[in-house]
Image: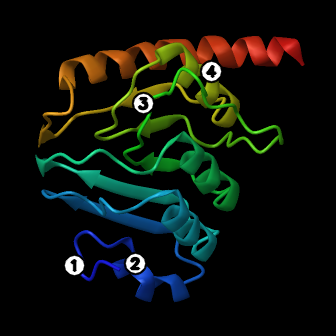
């Protein structure tokens, strides 16, 4: 276990007892909970089922690839159905051998219309857009890479462009899904 409160997601553990927590906002110049992964995100989400606003945003500093992936986003939305504002870095680098599949259940979040993906790397825009259209069908706006984070893992401009492409595709995929029903 990492005892450094800036890197350990369980430094938030004292807040887990606040079951009615509605808003959590952390804007930092350093990496925000870089050890946060799908399992620890699940624990956060289970602890705060009434959460409406979750903002975990790194404004500046050295970049670390997020450990939360698109599956983690599904976990968060399943456990926090009232969530309507989200800022979270996710690792959207997709393995072409095993692209993510949206959940089979009908657990989509219709409250979220905008997401700031903060400092999220991304590869396959169409696959990510198809995935997001299934879990956040009313998503209309996305932003990413808005801070001054120093990233050597890839081109910030390239990642931002890919997220812009996803933002254009999600409503199209969502409309196709609606027409199929």
**How far across and down, in percent of the image, does residue 84 sit?**
55, 49
- Marks 4 and 2, Cα distance to the nearest angstrom? 32 Å
Q: Quadrant of the C terminus?
A: top right
Q: Are marks 4 and 2 in contact (CB under 8 Å)?
A: no
Q: Are marks 1 and 2 in contact (CB under 8 Å)?
A: no
**How far across and down, in percent of the image, does residue 47 sit?**
59, 76
- Marks 3 and 1, Cα distance to the nearest angstrom? 27 Å
**How far across and down, in percent of the image, does residue 86 sit?**
46, 48
Q: What residue does disc 3 label?
A: 93
Badge 4: residue crowd in 10 Å (few <14, some 14–19, many ≥20):
many
Q: Taking 176 as reference, is 148 above or below it?
A: below
Callout 3 secondary element: loop
Disc number at residue 130?
Answer: 4
Callout 1 secondary element: loop
Residue depicted at x 48% and y 49%: 85
Q: Quadrant of the N terminus?
A: bottom left
Front label number (4 vs 3): 3
Judged left or right of residue 171, residue 157 is left
**How far across and down, in percent of the image, does residue 173 sit?**
66, 14
Instruction: Kindly indicate the quadrant of the structure image that contains residue 138.
Output: top right
Judged left or right of residue 99, residue 4 is left
Q: Residue furthest front?
A: 97
Q: Are marks 3 and 1 in contact (CB under 8 Å)?
A: no
The answer to which of marks 3 and 1 sits earlier in the sequence is 1
Q: Taking 75 as reference, is 149 above or below it?
A: above
Badge 1: residue crowd in 10 Å (few <14, some 14–19, many ≥20):
few
- Marks 1 and 2, Cα distance to the nearest angstrom? 10 Å
Residue depicted at x 75% and y 39%: 103
């Amino acid at each position: 276990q990492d005892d450094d409160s800036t890197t350990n997601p369980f430094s938030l553990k004292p807040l887990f007892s606040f079951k009615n927590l509605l808003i959590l906002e952390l804007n930092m110049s350093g990496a925000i909970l870089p050890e946060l992964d799908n399992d620890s995100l699940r624990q956060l989400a289970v602890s705060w089922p009434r959460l409406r606003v979750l903002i975990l945003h790194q404004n500046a500093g050295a970049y670390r690839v997020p450990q939360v992936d698109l599956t983690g986003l599904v976990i968060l939305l399943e456990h926090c159905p009232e969530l309507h504002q989200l800022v979270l870095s996710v690792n959207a680098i997709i393995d072409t051998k095993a692209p993510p599949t949206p959940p089979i259940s009908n657990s989509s979040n219709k409250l979220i219309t905008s997401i700031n993906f903060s400092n999220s790397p991304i590869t396959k825009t169409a696959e990510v857009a198809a995935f997001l259209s299934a879990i956040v069908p009313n998503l209309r706006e996305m932003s990413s890479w808005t801070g001054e984070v120093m990233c050597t893992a890839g081109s910030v401009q390239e990642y931002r462009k890919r997220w812009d492409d996803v933002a254009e595709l999600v409503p199209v995929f969502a409309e196709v899904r609606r027409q199929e029903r």
